Amino acid sequence: MPDQPTPDFLRAHTRLARPTLVPEVQLHVADDVVALWEAMETEGGGAGQDPPFWAAAWPGGQALARHVLDHPELVAGRQVLDLGAGSGLVAVAALQAGAAGVLASDVDPYSHAAVALNAEVNGVAGIELAGDVLDEEPAVDVVLAGDVCYDREMTARVLPFLGAAWLRGATVLLGDPGRAYVPKEGLLAQAEYDVPDADGGQVRRTTVWRLP
């Protein structure tokens, strides 16, 4: 596990940008993920096992952020979980839409630093940072999960967690650009967006799903 990175490291190796679908939010992003990963290893206290997912605005997160900004009643005055928070895009958007507070969950300490920095850039407060919560029962009213079904193992952990949150009465929204692991049943499509992929290439039709 890498050491806790500093805000100065993130500023030095990223640039501020506004996601295509969510220009209301500024994020620290990286143009060259490989170079960033190498810098994390040599300068940042260790890179860890995973690429720097936190340094990009992924399609599922952009779709969720757009959806809550367009429908603030989903989160206004409520406690929100941003599951797999990454950059904190969804957490920031939820606060901009009037959420009472956000629990931003991610296993990567670089994500925690990025969420805090991006919250500061956007002038929002009320984000609590957490690691892996998939074996817990966070006391939240809304679960926003963007791009979390990226492989079979993760999906097998995430879907029961989302189902349990729904059974406890939470509103559960899942943003995903058509990955194969997202189930074809038990979800209701709320909105669809065409979103450029995180590398700026292919445009992907991305759906915001809701557990009924």
Image (cartoon, grey):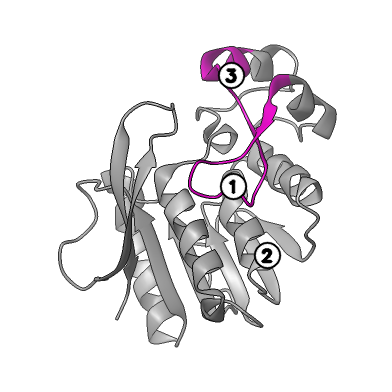
Q: Nearer the viewer, mark 1 or mark 3?
A: 1
| Res. 135 visible in picture | no
On screen, residue 1 above or below 9: below
Please give left or right for residue 183 compared with residue 196 in the image. left
User: Image quadrant of residue 91?
Assistant: bottom right
Residue 175 percent location from the top left of the image: 38, 57
Residue 55 percent location from the top left of the image: 59, 33
Residue 82 percent location from the top left of the image: 56, 61
**Residue with the mark numbered 2:** 96
Is 33 within the magenta? yes
Q: Return the residue nearer the eye: 142 or 16.
A: 16
- Choose the circle earlier in sequence order: 3 or 2: 3
Q: Are marks 2 and 1 in contact (CB under 8 Å)?
A: no
**How many residues crowd around disc 3 within 10 Å: few (fewer than 14), some, or many (20 or more)?**
many
- Choose the circle earlier in sequence order: 2 or 1: 1
Which quadrant would the C terminus be assigned to in this image?
A: bottom left
Q: Judging from the image, what secondary structure is the residue with disc 2 in?
A: helix
User: Image quadrant of residue 72?
Assistant: bottom right
Q: Which region is colored magenta? A: 13-38
Which quadrant would the N terminus be assigned to in this image?
A: top right
Q: Which amino acid, by three-letter code, is at mark 1? A: Pro
Q: Which amino acid, by three-letter code, is at mark 3? A: Trp
Is 65 within the magenta? no
**Residue with the mark numbered 3:** 37
**How many residues crowd around disc 2 within 10 Å: few (fewer than 14), some, or many (20 or more)?**
many
| Res. 152 visible in picture | yes
**Which residue does the image show at 69% across and 47% down from the upper left?**
115
Please give left or right for residue 200 compared with residue 181 in the image. right
Q: Which mark is residue 23?
A: 1
